[in-house]
Image: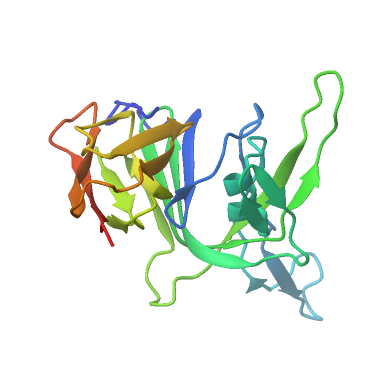
């Protein structure tokens, strides 16, 4: 995970995590991600009397920025996040139509920087790759940088500050119990504090699931579940848990 506040001297390398709309995109192929886009478009203005060089070069369209990659961790939740469709248990039901979604994009580098794009558009994703040998099937995706609606700077690159956030901040379960996902953004590894009685937590590749047992206690269950940043224990995020007995 991220090396927070490393003295990187301006060099950005390695990939720790990508978050889109507050959700972690699954593991990316070993090629990592590519920062590309289209070049700027210009029109040259020539004068009849000056034939060796144009007198004016006008930019009609600025260059674009697009992050592309291939997500190879094809668990249902990851597939739904970047290609749509539906997750039914361990099954991913593919979408009938392509999706276009906008949101904040955050990239954590292994050399200790955070790249933030305030508004990015998830372009139509598609399944590509192969099966057999070293080929890997995955979902190729593109995230194009858009102008923020408030006219501000479209993004930033800065040293990663320690942080951890959760979404949602509260969960309510039925009496019969069940499981619900919690989306966590963190600058590095995190641990789970004391888990309230009747609840448990599963963490698989950074995805967190809170599980509630059936409530036969005779009263309402409630408590707080804390996620603590290992590099800075003062940084923590809390999820409030409730489960009625009715």
- Where residue 149 sits in the image (x, y, percent)? 44, 77
Residue 31 in view (yes/no): yes
- Where residue 240 sits in the image (x, y, percent)? 22, 52
The residue that appears at 68% across and 46% down in the rendered structure is 91
Image check: 55 left or right of 4? right
Image check: 241 left or right of 155? left
Compare residues 61 and 138 and report the one nearer the observer.
138
Image check: 106 left or right of 56? left
Q: In this view, does 26 lie above or below 170?
A: above
The residue that appears at 54% across and 44% down in the rendered structure is 25
Residue 160 in view (yes/no): no
Q: In which quarter of the image is the N terminus?
A: top left
Compare residues 176 and 46 and report the one nearer the observer.
176
- Where residue 190 sits in the image (x, y, percent)? 30, 31
Place residue 123 in its image quadrant.
bottom right
The residue that appears at 85% across and 28% down in the rendered structure is 131
Place residue 225 in its image quadrant.
top left
The residue that appears at 42% across and 42% down in the rendered structure is 209
Q: In this view, does 21 lie above or below 78?
A: below
Q: Quadrant of the C terminus?
A: bottom left
Place residue 143 in its image quadrant.
bottom right
Q: Is residue 26 above or below residue 169?
A: above
Compare residues 93 and 197 and report the one nearer the observer.
197
Image check: 223 left or right of 155? left
Q: How many marks?
A: 0
């Amino acid at each position: 995970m991220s090396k927070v506040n490393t003295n990187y001297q301006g060099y950005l390398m390695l990939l720790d995590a990508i978050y889109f709309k507050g959700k972690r995109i699954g593991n990316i192929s070993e090629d990592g991600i590519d920062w590309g886009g289209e070049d700027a478009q210009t029109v040259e203005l020539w004068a009849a009397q000056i034939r060796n060089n144009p007198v004016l070069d006008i930019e009609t369209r600025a260059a674009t920025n697009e992050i592309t990659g291939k997500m190879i961790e094809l668990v249902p939740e990851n597939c739904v996040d970047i290609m749509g469709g539906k997750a039914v248990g361990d099954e991913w039901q593919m979408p009938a139509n392509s999706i276009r979604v906008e949101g904040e994009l955050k990239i954590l580098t292994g050399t200790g920087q955070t790249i933030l794009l305030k508004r990015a558009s998830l372009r139509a994703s598609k399944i590509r790759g192969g099966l057999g040998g070293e080929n890997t099937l995955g979902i190729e995706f593109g995230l194009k940088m858009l102008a923020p609606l408030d006219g501000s700077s479209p993004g930033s690159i800065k040293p990663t500050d320690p942080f951890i956030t959760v979404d949602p901040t509260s969960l309510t379960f039925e009496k019969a119990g069940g499981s619900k996902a919690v989306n966590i953004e963190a600058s590095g590894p995190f641990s789970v504090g004391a888990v309230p009685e009747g609840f448990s937590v599963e963490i698989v590749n950074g995805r967190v699931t809170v599980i509630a047992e059936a409530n036969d206690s005779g009263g309402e269950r409630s408590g707080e579940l804390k996620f603590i940043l290992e590099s800075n224990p003062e940084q923590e995020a809390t999820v409030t848990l409730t489960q009625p007995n009715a």
